[in-house]
Each structure stands twice: as C-alpha cells, then as structure tokens.
Image (cartoon, rainbow, N blue to C red):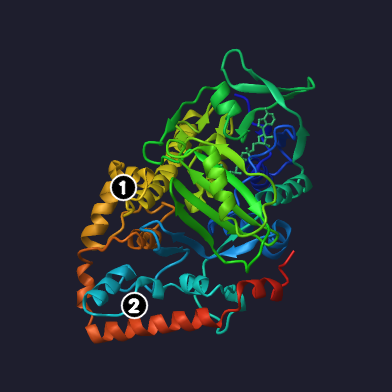
Amino acid sequence: MSEIKKIVVVGGGTAGWMAASAMAKTLGTRDRQIVVIESDQIGTVGVGEATIPMILLFNRILGIKEDDFIRATQATFKLGIEFADWRRLGHSYFHPFGHYGVDMEGIPFQHFWLRWKANGGGGGHDLFSAETQAAGRNRFMRVADERPRRLPPVNYAYQFDAGLFAAFLRRYSEERGVVREEGRIVEVGRHGETGDVDALVLDDGRVIDGDFFVDCSGFRGLLIGETLGAPYESWTHWLPTDRAVAVPCTRVSDMTPYTRATALEAGWQWRIPLQHRTGNGYVFSSAFLSEDEASARLMERLDGEPLGDPRVLRFTAGRRIKSWDRNVVALGLSSGFLEPLESTSIHLIQAGVAKLLAHFPQRRSEPRLAEKYSREMAEDYEGIRDFLIAHYKLTERDDTPFWRHCRDMAVPDSLQARLDLFASRGEVLARHQELFKESNWLSVLMGMGMAPQGYHPVADQRDFSQLDSTLVQIQQAVMERAAAMPLHDQYLMQAGLNA
Ligand code: FAD
C-alpha cells in the first residue's frame, strides 16, 4: 500500500506553519516532500496572541533560540491571567502558571494550606505563588538570571504577534526544505476506490498531488469538513460565547507580564500587551448582545488609540468528532475551537502536531492510528472544555441575563464530579495527561469562591507549629523573590529583548 512520500499542508496560518516546521525538523525533507499551500487572498484568522508555557517546549524541540524568537515576534512574558469581575463585580483573582507552595509527603500543598487556614493561619493561597506575586508587582525575570541560583523555575509563556510567529516558522521551514505554494484551492480530488484525498486543484489550474494531507485551512475545514464530511460536535450549550470583536491599540502603559480577562455584560474582554501594541477583544454571546453593541463597548474600553477598525469573528465552540479521517488530519481551527479564555488554541495545535508525529503513519490509510489519535485529541479538548465552563458556572454575578444564564446552566457530568470532589475535600480530579492540573484548577475554583469543606487526612499528621513556621517561611521566600525581580519592561530592555 502506498507509502507516504509527499505531505501536503493546507493553510499557512499558525497551525499550518507549526505543523510544517515540526515535521521538517523531525521527519525531515530528504525522504519525503513537505508542501504548504496558502492563499494570500483568503488570509489567516489574524488573532491569537496569548500562550501557555507548553510553547517553550515546542520552540525547544525545534531548536529555536528564545531571545531570537522574542525579538522576532514582539513578544512579552506572561506569568498567567488576571480574571477581573468574574466572581462578582469588583473582585479579581489570578491564575498563575506554576505551583503553589511545595507538596509534602507526596500530598498536594493545598491540603496543608487548608488545614493551616482552618486553624487560624494567615494568608491566602496567592501568597504561595511566585508567579502571582511577581505579576502583581509587574515584575519578571527568567530563573537563569536570578540570584541565588538553584531556585525552582518561574513558569511563564509569551504574549506575541501570531502573524510574526507564522512568518518566523515559515522562514524556519523553508530553510529546511519545505516548499510553499501560493494559490487558492478550488477543487479537491479523491481516489476513485479508497476515497482518500489525492490531489488539490488551485485557481490557476495547477494540480498538487499528495499522499497525506494536514488540514490547517481554518474554521471552514476544507478537507476534513467540506470534503470528508467529518461531523462537528457543538458545545455552545455549555460555552455560549460565539463571537469576538478584536482590535489592537497603541501601547500607553507598562507591559504587564500577564493577560487580563475582564468579565463584561455578555462575555469578557481580553487585554494582551505586546511590545509594539496591545491586543484587545470582546468575546461574547450573540444571543445576549449584538455585534455593533460589542464593538462599541470594546472601543470605549481601549486604553490606547485603536490601530484599525474592530473586526468580528464568528465561531462555534466544539470539535470535530474525528480529527483524523482517512489520509487527512485536521489541526488548528479546522479541528475545533475553544474560546481563548485560557489561551489554549495554539497549545491544541501543538498537542495535535506532537500526537501526529508520535503516530505518524507509514501508509496512507492507518485506521487504528487515526482512531487512537482522534480519541486522544477528544480527551484533550474535553479536559480544557470542562475547565473553561467552570469559569462561567461558578459566577456569583446576576446583574445581566448572560451571567444568570451561565450560573443556572447544566454542566457536563465530568465537570460536576470535579466540582463535587473539590468542594468536599479540596482534591482535584485531573487525568495524568491532562493539560490543566492541580494548581490550575485550584486557582480558578478558589478564585471563583469555592471553599473546600475538608482536606486530606495526612495534613493533620504534621505538628501544627512546625507547619505554621514552614508555611510562613515559604510565604516570605516567595515575597522576597518577587520583590527582587526587575520590572517587566526593564527586564526586556536589560536582556536586550526589545525588538
Ligand atoms: P487560519 O489562521 O484561519 O489559517 C487558515 C489558512 O488556510 C490560511 O493560510 C488560509 O489562507 C488557508 N486557506 C483556507 N482556505 C484555503 C483555500 N481554499 N486555498 C488555499 N488556502 C486556504 N489562540 C491562542 O492560542 N491564544 C489566543 O489568545 C487566541 N486568541 C484567539 C481569539 C479569537 C477571537 C479567535 C477566533 C482565535 C484565537 N486563538 C487564540 C486561536 C488562534 O487564532 C488559532 O488557533 C490559530 O491562529 C490557528 O489558526 P489556523 O492556522 O488554524 O487558521
């Protein structure tokens, strides 16, 4: 059966170039050709600026030097997300990357902290997170530059210009033999017997054949959806936002080493500081607010001068049930969409690329591999989905119909089980492979006001005065560390990272 000699990537957005560059690095272009087709006429979605720490791993695997990458993409550092007005108006909490305190006896830190608090210990869980404390002071430093050495790493990601990132990866890919074809695909050819995709016809009549296709064509899913008809499962009954209006503005203040997500009347607003501009958007539900109203609201909330007109994007939360069908794998927006509340889309591309490489087929048709891949991607999507829903469901807000809807909506059983366990004893149900782990759930559930009734019995085994002094010491060390870091703007300059 036909071997894979030619891989065709459809689309040159973030997904297309992430897939092409990773395949060029790991599979190489000596024994097989890698072609990317993109259309300047169609363009890319043009948003997607905030990431999570896994992106560091992607760059490391590709051998990309961090400083080059930061300068090329106008990036800033990101320690987490500030959630303003989510629990109630005027309240805010921080979801940091990284951990709280230190685990003891193999039991997560929060159990010891919960016991401490129950017995009069002072200080919220935020005081045990270096990322939260640094972000609160607008400070940042990479661990390699910190004194003393041997500190645990401060976890971070980037806020960057995704268009510049795609251009950076395009150069990287072309230097490694990837061929780019400019043109609009107007027809998809399929093998008469197998039904596999085998050729793409461009608007100028050129025909590009291939053995294996990676569909990175964006929301339309040109191959996976329009051609193969892979069904899409909608989750709008749990994640009601279905529109975003986006506009960048000039930068007028210091760059915060974090993204801000502010809950508004029918959704939420993102604010993402980059070196050359600030990204802004209002993600909302069209059942509760019109596009014009959302645009006007966003424009009045900008803290700089708008750099263009607001642009509306429409989406449906959900995923392709089969993200690998026949000889087509869908990556990026063609495989599904979860709103950008926790900056997970670029990560989902990365997860898809990693799984594709781990399962890379020898022949065009490998149904068992396809099945395994689709199942694993479904688990990734569902874990993130539950985490996002929790942000809405736990609100105490009842000031608008949107928030009343969120508060009263039913949630998936898998999320309810997680909420119940956390409420009873502060324990988090997260699979080993799941993206959001103990500390992530902890910050959001506590931030939204959940207060566990109990904790792990091992926490009671510690002598209380010893526990008290350990926790006070950890708190002090975290504070001192955060206070010793330079301001984020200053650090970018000192380290020569300003573009
Ligand atoms: P696209 O960017 O749409 O690229 C599609 C490509 O396919 C283009 O090159 C296009 O030319 C090509 N194409 C399509 N049809 C044809 C054809 N017929 N012929 C030839 N070429 C074709 N992600 C994050 O990680 N963080 C964020 O903060 C974030 N914010 C977001 C905010 C919003 C409102 C939205 C909608 C998304 C956000 N995302 C975010 C997601 C992120 O933008 C996408 O995951 C990412 O850009 C990948 O897009 P893509 O490459 O799949 O699709």
- Ligand 1's image quarter is top right
Q: Is mark 1 within 8 Å of ligand 1?
A: no
Q: Tell me the crowding category of disc 1: few under 14, some 14 to 19, or many 20 or more residues within 10 angstroms, Cα based.
A: some
Q: Position of residue 443 (x, y in %)?
A: 38, 63
Circle 2/circle 1 CB separation < 8 Å = no
Residue 49 rendering spot, x and y as whole percentages: 60, 52
Q: Which residue is mark 2?
A: 123
Q: Secondary structure at mark 1?
A: helix
Residue 215 makes an appearance in the image: yes
Q: Is residue 414 above or below residue 159?
A: above
Side of 157 where 446 appears, left or right: left
* Closest to the observer, 311 or 76: 311
Residue type pointed to by label 1: Arg
Is residue 272 shown above or below 413? below
Quadrant of the rendered image containing residue 327: top right
Hey, which quadrant is residue 332 in on the image?
top right
Which mark's residue is nearer the viewer, 2 or 1? 1
- Badge 1 is on which residue? 407
Residue 359 visible, this orientation: no
Q: CA distance from mark 2 to mark 1?
A: 29 Å
Q: Is residue 249 above or below residue 223?
A: below
Q: Which of the two discs, 2 and 1, labels the residue nearer the N terminus?
A: 2
Q: Where, quadrant-wise, is the C terminus in this rendering?
A: bottom right
The residue that appears at 34% across and 77% down in the rendered structure is 123
Name the residue: 65% across, 44% down.
46
Q: Label 2 amino acid? A: Gly
Q: Residues within 10 Å of mark 2 (few under 14, many from 20)?
A: some
